[in-house]
Image (tube, rainbow, N blue to C red):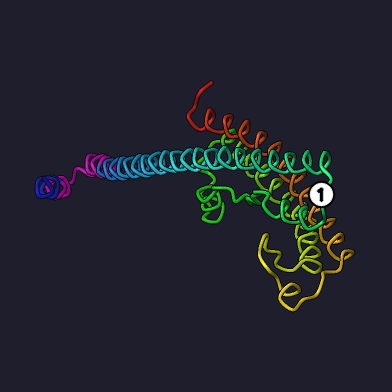
Amino acid sequence: MLRYFRQLRQRLLTDSKFSKYLLYAVGEILLVVIGILIALQIDNWNEGRKSDISAGAYRDRLISDIVQDTTNIKIAMELRRKTIANIQSYYRFFDSNRVSIEENLDISSKVDIELNRYFPVNYTFEDMKSSGNMNLLNEEQQHIMSELSQAQERAQLVAEKLMTVFFHEANEEQKYLGNWRPNKKDFYEAIGMKKDPEAMAQGLLHRQNKFNSLASYHVVMIETHNQIIEKSKDAIRILQGED
């Protein structure tokens, strides 16, 4: 084909048919331009297709993260409710029974409690932000994911503040009681000395303060978890393109 066009161009020049040659040259240039435009269009189509595939993969990963985070939250909420119930059960006993400080310490040391810190499953969203791939989501998807991320961050900030009180009371309890072991001889018993009743009372007070702060922590976290669950439902619906 190229040989044919070359021969045709040479014949036009030889026959001094310049106007026809000019038209031919313009036509040849147009063919080249059209070829380039077609190639660019195909390249753009391929790039767009790659972006669509990448965007779809990211959306699937985001949904997977949200589903896993919601599962973790629901498990955590059950543990939080159990801890709250155990603390309430202890206080019902404490309010209705008059027992010695030693018995009270033994009973309170057996209360089954869980701290259960919250670590959101948001690896894909953080990856998209750090890699500059947020543009693969449309505006509505970006907005809902940002709202969900902010809700998760708020939950973590609230948790850190509430846990500060819990750890303070736990440390104070440790100062007065040490490693209290129910129904076992401790250092004082081993050397034939009695424990300081005031120190035991102070230790029990800090233990109860620890229980109170932990119960408050779990109540607040259950509320924030419910907010995250509702926001997660909206995020999944929007990522799936549902109305």
Q: 110 or 38, which is in the foreground?
A: 110
Quadrant containing the N terminus is top left
Q: In which quadrant of the rendered image does the C terminus lie?
A: top right
Local SS, label 1:
loop
Magenta highlight range? 9-27
Q: Which residue is mark 1?
A: 99
Judged left or right of residue 129, residue 61 is left
- Residue 54 lies, in percent from the top left, at 41, 44
Question: In the image as oriented, which residue stretches furthest toward the right?
Answer: 198
Q: Is residue 166 magenta?
A: no
Residue 190 image-quadrant placement? bottom right
Give the image location of residue 156, x and y in percent: 68, 50
Residue 177, given in percent of the width and then of the height, sits at 77, 66
Q: Residue furthest top?
A: 243
Q: Residue furthest front?
A: 192
Q: Is residue 188 left or right of residue 183?
A: right
Residue for point 49% across, 27% down: 241
- Which secondary structure dominates the residues rendered in magenta? helix
Q: Quadrant of residue 95?
A: top right
In terms of image quadrants, where is residue 56? Answer: top left
> Front-most of 85 and 24?
85
Foreground pick, 57 / 34: 57
Reply yes or no: does residue 18 show up in magenta: yes
The vertical placement of 234 against 84, above or below, is above
Please, what is the three-letter code of the amino acid marked with disc 1?
Val
- Is 44 left, or right, of 4 in this rendering? right
The percent coordinates of residue 28 (x first, y second) are: 25, 43
**Depicted 133 relative to depicted 220: above or below:** below
Residue at x 54% of width, y 46% of height = 134
| Other-residue count near label 1 (Cα within 10 Å), few / some / many at <14 / 14–19 / ≥20 | few
